[in-house]
Image (cartoon, grey):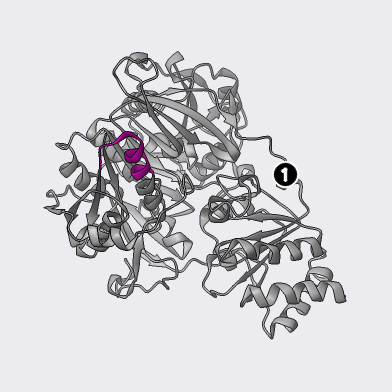
């Protein structure tokens, strides 16, 4: 099975936001970056599918030059090759621009299955995978917690059966033909980490670089970016741990009356 | 005209649909609002929607729309939108909307701004606020290009009881659409719950909830000791349950349980929006986090910036001493 997994590089979780002068985007040069967490789960799922069904895993990313770090990391974890659509503007682009950039390099590859994370930890648009499916003319399902590929009827046509997460602890199985696009939920599997052997092997693996297609005009624009306003007046309690603890207990008992 | 796409399951409307109607009424500024309700047989729910102060309610009915599939909904709603030519399309930001709305917007090549918490209109142009970078920042976003512009409204961002009701019911009519059942590629099975929910966190009076700040599974005991001292249930944010440190049934947030206890004590939880939607209805929220900029402090009544491994034992002691 020929599997593609689309990953994004996002600011690390402990990054403290700093804005550019126009306050329309972050200061990218100040951020430290890591693989988007839901994409890491999508990568792991694609490696497991390859281990079960054979084939290859190609990891794809659309973003600035810095993205090659997470592509190399994915190769070290076991992906076979990488495709990098390189363009500095893709770092802050919306889901349509990213999906169009990915679709441009993926459409001639004839992948059987395309996985990606359900959303990114930066803009959190939760659109790219679904838009990519539409651009490639493929069926899709989102927020997936289990992937089965099989041919139960013995018809020679492998089919996909996936477990979608619904809200409030509900799930649903959905069947569809291959090829297809799935957006993967965090926690679908246990992540593996790169071994030294994997890191060495990754150095010899191919990262194909492609240029982004001449993009259509962006469909959304961030006009300002700011630290959210507080919705509540938070009373901050300071002091040593013992003092703060004592004061909190007093407040919960006497002011809030919840204990 | 502003279009609201309502969501029903088994003929029952969800709460977020009413929140979205409230948002539409606030943004409309005199423009008429039309509600579209897709499904197979949705007459009763449509009459319920007609109690809202809106211009009309349109049912978009086809046997091919039950059960829900993204292919079916995209085809039906594409047809509805082409017939109605709205300037703005509002949808509740539910898992179902996330599944089909980006496809619908992509097919029509129109912007979709997701997870919106507020809007601002100046000179006839609206911008929409949405959380980004895990809630650390808010982005104000302007849709570009021709209408319609799609906007999905975050769960809990508007209040359902703010949805204005009409003096008389709005007219309900059927909007004919043609959905070809054979073109739907997804074949859904019946929804199910993984396991009987042994823990009903929604009934808990007090909850101690842990996030990534707990660092490792062995440290869950630290939080458990505090829960015991408070007579509280133990809960967690998604990453903790993903790691298997606590069972999934103890997860609070959009994919887990929604809770509204008297006391919600968040230990080492940063406060990503997926978690906040599950707990911001709590009466009193306490946040303990080492990061003073953690978004959890935006919803907290009391906050302590510090090391939870020092503070939690001190809290247990203070509870026992007093």
Residue B179 position by quadrant = top left
Residue drawn at x 60%, y 45% as measured from the top left: B256
Q: Secondary structure at mark 1?
A: loop
Observer-nearest of A86 and B133: A86
Relative horizontal placement of residue B261, taking residue A141 as reference (left or right): right
Q: Is residue B127 above or below residue A177?
A: below
Residue A218 percent across, percent down from the top left: 23, 51
Between residues A122 and B245, which one lies in front from this camera angle?
A: B245
* B220 sits to left or right of B100: right
Assign the C terminus of chain A to one quadrant of the image: bottom right
The answer to which image quadrant residue B305 occupies is: bottom right
Q: Residue, x 14% and y 36% (percent of image)?
A: A108
Q: Does residue A82 lie above or below B2 as drawn? A: below
- Tell me where residue A53 appears, x and y as whole percent: 32, 34
Q: Residue at x 73, y 74 (%)?
A: B313
The magenta stretch is A45-57
Residue at the extreme front: A197
- Quarter occupied by the N terminus of chain A: top left
* Numbered circles on residues, count: 1
A105 vs B44, nearest the viewer = A105
**Residue B32 in sight here:** no
Q: Nearer the viewer, residue B321 or B2?
A: B321
For the residue carrying disc 1, how many other residues have a C-alpha within 10 Å: few (<14), some (14-19), or many (20+)? some
**Disc 1 target residue:** B199
Q: Main secondary structure of the magenta part?
A: helix
């Amino acid at each position: 099975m020929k599997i593609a997994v689309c990953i994004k590089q996002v600011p690390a979780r402990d990054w403290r936001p700093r804005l550019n002068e126009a306050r329309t985007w972050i200061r990218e040069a100040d951020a430290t970056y890591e693989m988007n967490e839901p994409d890491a789960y999508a990568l792991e799922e694609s490696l497991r599918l390859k281990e079960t069904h054979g084939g290859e895993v190609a990891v794809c990313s659309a973003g600035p030059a810095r993205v090659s770090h997470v592509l190399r990391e994915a190769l070290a974890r076991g992906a076979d090759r990488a495709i990098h659509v390189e363009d500095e503007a893709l770092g802050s682009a919306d889901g349509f621009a990213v999906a169009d950039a990915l679709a441009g390099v993926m459409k001639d590859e004839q992948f059987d299955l395309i996985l990606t994370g359900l959303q990114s930890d930066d803009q959190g648009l939760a659109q790219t995978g679904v838009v990519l499916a539409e651009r490639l003319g493929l069926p899709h399902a989102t927020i997936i917690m289990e992937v089965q590929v099989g041919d139960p009827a013995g018809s020679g046509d492998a089919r996909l059966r996936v477990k979608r997460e619904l809200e409030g602890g509900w799930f649903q199985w959905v069947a569809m033909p291959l090829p297809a696009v799935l957006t993967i939920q965090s926690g679908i599997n246990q992540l593996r980490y790169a071994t030294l052997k994997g890191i060495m092997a990754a150095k010899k693996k191919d990262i194909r670089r492609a240029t982004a297609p001449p993009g259509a005009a962006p469909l959304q624009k961030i006009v300002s970016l700011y630290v959210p306003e507080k919705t509540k007046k938070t009373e901050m309690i300071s002091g040593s741990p013992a003092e703060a603890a004592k004061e909190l207990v007093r407040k919960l008992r006497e002011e809030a009356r919840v204990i | 005209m502003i279009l609201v796409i309502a969501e029903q399951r088994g003929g029952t409307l969800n709460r977020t649909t009413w929140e979205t109607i409230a948002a539409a009424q606030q943004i409309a500024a005199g423009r008429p609002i039309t509600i579209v309700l897709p499904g197979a047989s949705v007459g009763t729910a449509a009459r319920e929607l007609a109690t809202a102060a809106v211009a009309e309610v349109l049912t978009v009915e086809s046997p091919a729309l039950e059960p829900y599939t993204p292919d079916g909904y995209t085809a039906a709603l594409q047809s509805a939108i082409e017939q109605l030519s709205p300037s703005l399309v509002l949808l509740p930001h539910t898992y179902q909307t996330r599944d089909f709305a980006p496809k619908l917007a992509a097919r029509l090549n129109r912007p979709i701004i997701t997870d919106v918490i507020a809007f601002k209109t100046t000179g006839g142009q609206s911008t929409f606020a949405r959380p980004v970078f895990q809630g650390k920042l808010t982005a104000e976003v302007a849709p570009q290009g021709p209408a319609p512009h799609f906007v999905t409204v975050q769960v809990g961002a508007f209040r359902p009881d703010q949805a204005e009701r009409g003096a008389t019911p709005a007219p309900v009519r059927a909007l004919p659409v043609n959905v070809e059942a054979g073109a739907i590629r997804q074949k859904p099975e019946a929804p199910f719950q993984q396991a009987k929910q042994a823990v009903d966190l929604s009934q808990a009076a007090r909850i101690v909830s842990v996030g990534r700040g707990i660092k490792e599974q062995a440290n869950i005991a630290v939080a458990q000791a505090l829960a015991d001292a408070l007579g509280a249930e133990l809960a967690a944010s998604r990453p903790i349950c993903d790691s298997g440190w606590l069972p999934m049934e103890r997860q609070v947030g959009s994919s887990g349980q929604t809770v509204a206890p008297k006391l919600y004590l968040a230990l080492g939880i940063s406060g990503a929006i997926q978690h906040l939607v599950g707990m911001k209805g709590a009466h009193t929220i306490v946040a303990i986090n080492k990061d003073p900029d953690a978004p959890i402090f935006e919803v907290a009544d009391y906050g302590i910036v510090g090391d939870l491994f020092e503070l939690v034992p001190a809290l247990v002691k203070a509870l026992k001493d007093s």
